[in-house]
Amino acid sequence: MLIGRASGSSEADVAAEAALQKRIFQATRSGSGWDEITAEARGLAMAKLEALPAEQRQAIGDLRTYADRVIAGQLVMARSPWFKFFIDYDPATDLARVHCPVLALFGEKDLQVPAESNRKAFVEALARGGNRNVKVEVLPGAYLAHVHGVPAAKAS
């Protein structure tokens, strides 16, 4: 939602995209509902594309073909075993088993992994495992999306 807002999406668009994302997560877990999701995603994409200035629409070419290609690429990932694992993975369990010194860096302006809420969850998970040799920094003005390649927060 933060990324949508930062890109200038309206609150209604952000809400519609969040609702679609929730349904994608449900379909990923259940393996069903993909036709409805594809249709809904196409509708959202077409509305955004049709709202573009004429010059941009012309540069894209056939809007439906473009939308279908983009949606197909996104849904391939959402249907993958990796994505199914990712949306239900809670790194707190693994973090509680880390007992070596830890340096974690978060970007103050990161929209994918918001610094404050993820910093707190990261530190709490390490503390539950008894790790007190932890240094966490939030880098002012920085955009960082991952802590050593593992997202610091569980996907919702």
Image (tube, helix red, strand yellow):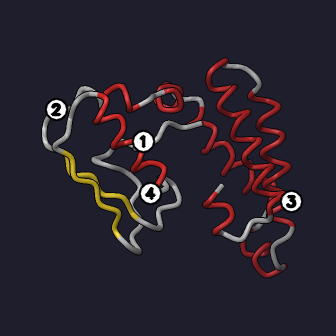
Label 4 to label 3: alpha-carbon separation: 32 Å
Instruction: Identify the mark nearer the N-term, 1 or 2.
Output: 2
| Dots 4, 2 in contact, CB < 8 A | no
Where residue 72 appears, x then y in whole percent?
A: 66, 42
SS under mark 4: helix
Q: Decide: few, some or many residues near mark 3? Use Cα within 10 Å; few <14, some 14-19, many ≥20.
A: few
Instruction: Identify the mark nearer the N-term, 1 or 4.
Output: 4
Label 1 to label 4: alpha-carbon separation: 10 Å
SS under mark 1: helix
At 53% from the left and 32% from the top, the residue drawn is 87
Instruction: Identify the mark nearer the N-term, 3 or 2.
Output: 3
Residue 78 quadrant: top right
Residue located beneath label 3 in the image: 47
Where residue 119 appears, x then y in whole percent?
A: 39, 50
Label 3 to label 1: alpha-carbon separation: 37 Å
Residue located beneath label 1 in the image: 121
Residue located beneath label 2 in the image: 99
125 in relation to 137, above or below:
above
Residue located beneath label 4 in the image: 115
Label 1 to label 2: alpha-carbon separation: 16 Å
At 71% from the left and 71% from the top, the residue drawn is 8
SS under mark 2: loop
| Dots 1, 2 in contact, CB < 8 A | no
Instruction: Identify the mark nearer the N-term, 4 or 3.
Output: 3
Q: For the residue marked with disc 2, what is the amino acid?
A: His
Q: Residue 63 — which label?
A: none
At 36% from the left and 38% from the top, the residue drawn is 124
Query: Where's the C terminus, which quadrant?
Result: top right
